[in-house]
Amino acid sequence: MQNEELVQFAQSWFTANNWAVSTFQKKSWQAFLEGYSGIVNAPTGSGKTYALLIPILLEYIQRKEKQKCDIPGLQCIWIAPIRALTQEIKLSAERAIDGLGLDLKVEIRSGDTSAADRIKQFENPPAILITTPESLHVILCNKNHKKLLENVKSIVVDEWHELMGSKRGVQVELALSRIKNICIDLRIWGISATIANIEQAMEVLLGMNYSLGKSIIIKADINKQIIIESLIPEKIDNFPWAGHLGIIMLDQIIPLIYKHKTTLIFTNTRSQCEIWYQKILAKDPELSGLLAMHHGSMGRELREWVEDALHETKLKAVVCTSSLDLGVDFRPVDAIIQIGSPKGVARFQQRAGRSGHSPGAISKIYFVPTHSLELMEAAALRFSIENQIVEERIPYIRCFDVLIQYLMTLAVSGGFNAEEIFLEVKNTFCFESLNKEEWGWILNFLVQGGNSLQAYDEYQKLGVKNGIYRIMNKRIATIHKLSIGTIVSSVSITLKYTSGKKIGTVEEWFIAQFKPGDHFWFAGMPLEFVRMKGLEAHVRKSKKKSGKIPSWQGGRMSLSSNLAEALRSQYIKLKRGEIQDSDIELESMKGLFNKQEEISHVPDVDEFLIEYFQTEDGYHLLMYPFEGRYVHEGLAALIARRLSFKIPISFSIAMNDYGFELLSDQKIDVEKLINYEVFSTNELFEDIQASINAIELARRKFRDIAKISGLLFEGFPGKSKKERHLQTTAHLLFDVFREYENENLLFQQTFEEVRTFQLEEVRMRKALKRIQNQKLIFVYPKWPTPFSFPIIVDSLSRDKLTSESIEDRIKKMTLQLED
């Protein structure tokens, strides 16, 4: 059949199912059949999966007709970022295969795939293999990977916007660089939600040379309607603090659960997920059996049960985290509740799209503030979506840790020719700037351990024979296979019932605080700790209603650049009295802003507010760039360093998304010390690098880089090393490189990542330039202001020399301020 006939054939199947073919779907089918690679850019729930699955099958039919026989071997690799999505794609693929009258096998390969099934996939491969970036690299580790991959005609990377902004995206880039040189006539496609730099996203996906050929971006002309409704608390506190609302909003949340068919309740962390699940059930026990929980640390069986129950409409609501952000189609879901600000427009849109997840359907999302000021973020989110403002996804570049891991993969699979692989790697976006000197350093690092570690055999991993770099011994190969991946976390402890059934995982530091007989909650269940056995915590069910809730390190997000800009615009709108009837969030914030204006000042667009006052804790210096937590962390360290050059002084630092605090025990003349020179971008790189804060951040970041590059090994199954041991080793290596091998590429990469992703140097530079064009407004309030209060409260946990609880101190401060 010709291309047009194939398209009509597919259309007839859509018609038989009472589906309409979208314009972007038809364009995708035609472009794929004409040999193009590219990206399909469409909103959630618009039919992106069939935009590429269908032409993959149509192209197979076309080749089959030409060859007049079935075509054996693996034809398509579909890469998905999460395991939950792989099952959804498999079901969609099997439905299309059956509908088009084909007899093709579709299989999944992930961390859950058994060893026996993995062997079978090499011996008798499916036509379509759905996998993850990590599992694809495990395939490349196999000596027979070329034979498995040689017939592949297409690769699809699902949710590419999500992968591109992480090192998993670099894994995809490197895997594609190898497969492109194994396969003939390969089409590479990405599926992406809307991001600001979609053209760059295609360049990163296809590589530097590939993108020069037949490539195309197909955008869906669909304006997904999202209804946003903010839940306004009955009383707006003039002195808000993070988390003070939250649970108070339950009286408004529970009626929404009953109002809708099925609701997803998104929290930003796993700990919040556990807490909200418990609080909702405690408030309304009638929801028992109708309410479930879903997060990444729960066991696979539990997660799959929740997903199946959602599909089958057995649940009224699920409290979840980003584990349900992506792709999975839960059609019964007709409403989303977002607890607290998601800190980014794209994330908010993605979550909203979990409801009304079908073409033409309306998405409904409720915003629940966890403190009063978050209502401003709700207004900023609404403004951004109405004006189609979305973030960029910043691609990683020069990730030498991922490259070193990848070269180890090739060495394990039979070896690699350095010249050949250098050219392949150079054609990726991530390593386009890689030069021969750096390449030589990487090879020397793998063979000899670099200049600092050459005396230690464990770091001499590769040997060279006849120009081919190969693994030195089986033990090194085994260690590498166990270490493939770029998702780095603390040492995990597996939770199991005493019967042996797995429940999920918690971090080592959390379980270490318990002794036999202690109680805690996990996945909504009260558990009693029985014993530790290696890296397993054995538990039994408990009837106790009290106990600690697990928390996981990390989890605090920062405002995205776009949302921060939108937030500043909403502040100005409220200050100038330009709010309209539809601005319910801004209307509710009038009292708080009036209080801020009364005690201090609300800055206009051309003003930068600096507050200075004394409390029993010391002298508080506060500044408000409204740029996000990460940027403020860097700015605070920078300003503290520059002030310390003028006078001998030490500061304690605190920050949130709106501003930062420098607390000291000595009074300073702020107007004399703080001028535009303090906010200069001159020598910014050097000042960030030299600040104690940046070095400590780099030391922590290096642990992740050391794990990915293979400098740190977490241990064999059942014999994992303790977190403290890994941390000590990482710090030791960091200090050795800092002292003796400053040119070490992994050491340099560490600071680059801290500047780019932790301190967000580019945004910091823009913020400093903006401040230099604003008038510095110095205000000396008598007590903490509505703007400063949440920052000061956030810093209370650093004060350990008091018997007062944090809650008691906050109540005491609030009463004093209200008086």
Image: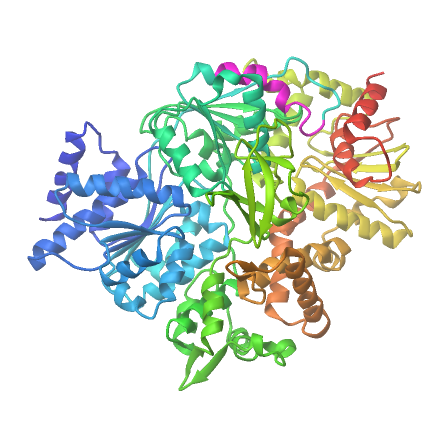
Q: Is residue 186 visible?
A: yes
The structure residue drawn at horizontal position 66% and vertical position 59%, both measured from the top left corner, is: 727
Residue 116 image-quadrant placement: bottom left
Instruction: Pick whichever, 214 or 814, lies toward us.
Output: 814
* Left or right of residue 704, residue 331 in this image: left
Instruction: Pick whichever, 797 or 525, lies toward us.
Output: 525
Q: Quadrant of the C terminus?
A: top right
Q: Main secondary structure of the magenta part?
A: helix
The residues colored magenta run 241-256
| Residue 561 vertical placement versus 688 (above, below) | above
* Residue 341 position in % (x across, y down): 58, 31
* Residue 803 position in % (x across, y down): 85, 33
* Left or right of residue 652, residue 294 in this image: left
Residue 636 image-quadrant placement: top right
| Residue 628 vertical placement versus 703 (above, below) | above
The question of residue 249 being in magenta is answered with yes
| Residue 306 vertical placement versus 501 (above, below) | above
* Residue 146 position in % (x across, y down): 29, 68
The question of residue 203 being in magenta is answered with no
The structure residue drawn at horizontal position 46% and vertical position 68%, both measured from the top left corner, is: 478
| Number of numbered discs | 0
